[in-house]
Amino acid sequence: MADQRSLPEETHTADPFGSQPILHEVDSWWKIRLTLMRRSLRENWRIFRRSKVGVFGLVIIAFWAIMAVMPTVFFATGFWNPAVYDPVTGLELNPPTRTMTMVERITDPNTEIDRRAVLLDGRIPDTLQIGDTFELPRQPAPPDGRHWLGTDPLGRDVLSQLMHGARASFFLGILAAVVTVVIGTTVGSMAAYFGGIVDAFLMRLADLLILIPGLAILIVIGAVFTFQLWHLAVVIGILSGFGGTAIVLKSQALAVKVKPFIDAARVAGGSARHIIFYHLIPNVMPLSVLYMMFTVTAAIQSEAVLSFLGVLNTDTSWGLMMNLARTQGYLLQVVDFWWLTIPAGLSVTLLSAAFFLVGRGMDEIVNPRLRRR
């Protein structure tokens, strides 16, 4: 008779189904991931701080972020009256005036006005006679204590429009960048993993979108449809995501595809979806974030151009401010009416350059060969 030895019995009095060890294991896994993420963020921030242009761009972005929030604070605290400082419906009720005299022929345009100008200006009564004097409101008004950057030809505060334009630029840039990253990363990773006909189709589509001028497409779409700000962000994200961004991210995904852990995941029975979304995309994401910054720059500039041309349907933006100066005849009078064009144009330039500089600073994180030894 065979010798039967008794085996020790395992008892789980606390949890007979073994769920407690599993939960503890999952909890430990998340703690490890968070620890590694914090360590990676600290290391990346240390590398980023060494880039002076990147830090400078970050300071500019922080400045405009504060500017975008300030109107809410000013209106909530009563520092600004919405009837005066609203960027769309606000109006200066007591604008500065200047004394004008109606004459047959103008010799001093600062103090004299002729009959033709009186008939064209709806603010002046048409009953005036030659030699009559009257007080003409100065709109656009130069900067003063009430309006730090003056008013536009419609009597609205320029600084308030500038702050609200920053909101529009941030919303547009971030939404366009997110759409670009989602589409570009997914398309590039799928093309790299599957190859063959999938790769050929997606890359020929990208070549086609690169071939067609993006601004021309946006102008045509804006002329046919009612083009609002979020529409523009989505279209820019689609054009960029399926275009050049997908090609660059595909090359990065190809380098990741040949790594041993991809083969190990495939041998372990991982599906194509699992490998793409859990292995390829996370390793391509750092380069995607870098291209996100460049997409924000392109989106802000595109919005300014479309608003300046009158194609974009939005309440207020920096491009729309310059469009108003153009339609009212002040675009070429920069010396006399600088507050109508220079603040908006400088804002577009600074914020676009800021995101580009941050992208240049992040380039050292993504590409270790650029780091200083």
Image (cartoon, helix red, strand yellow):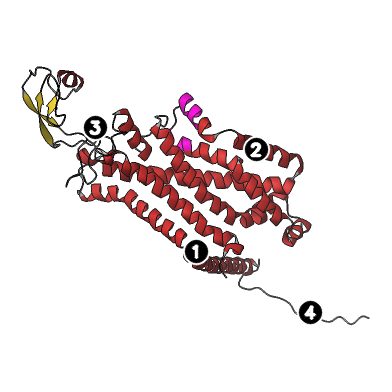
Q: Position of residue 25 (x, y in %)?
A: 62, 68
Q: Which mark is residue 207?
A: 2
Q: Amino acid at mark 2?
A: Asp
As helix, strand or loop, the secondary structure at mark 1 comes to helix
Q: Please tell me which residue is depicted at 49% across the width and 65% down the height of the picture.
A: 45
Q: Is residue 127 above or below residue 235?
A: above
Left or right relative to 268: residue 30: left
Q: Amino acid at mark 1?
A: Phe
Q: Earlier in the sequence, mark 1 or mark 2?
A: 1
Q: Secondary structure at mark 2?
A: helix
Image side of residue 308 versus residue 107, left or right: right
Q: Which residue is mark 1?
A: 48
Q: How many marks?
A: 4
Considering the whole magenta stretch, tell me its main secondary structure.
helix
Tag 3–tag 4 contact (CB < 8 Å): no
> What is the crowding at mark 3: few (fewer than 14 residues within 10 Å), some, or many (at least 20)?
some
Query: Mark 4 and 1 residues: CB-CB less than 8 Å, in contact?
Result: no
Secondary structure type for disc 3: loop
Front residue (pair 76, 98): 98
Q: For the N terminus, which image quadrant?
A: bottom right
Q: Residue at x 42, y 44 (%)?
A: 171
Q: Earlier in the sequence, mark 2 or mark 3?
A: 3
Residue that label 3 marks: 154
Location of residue 139 with respect to 19 vertically, above or below: above
Q: What residue span does the magenta drawing correspond to?
A: 218-232
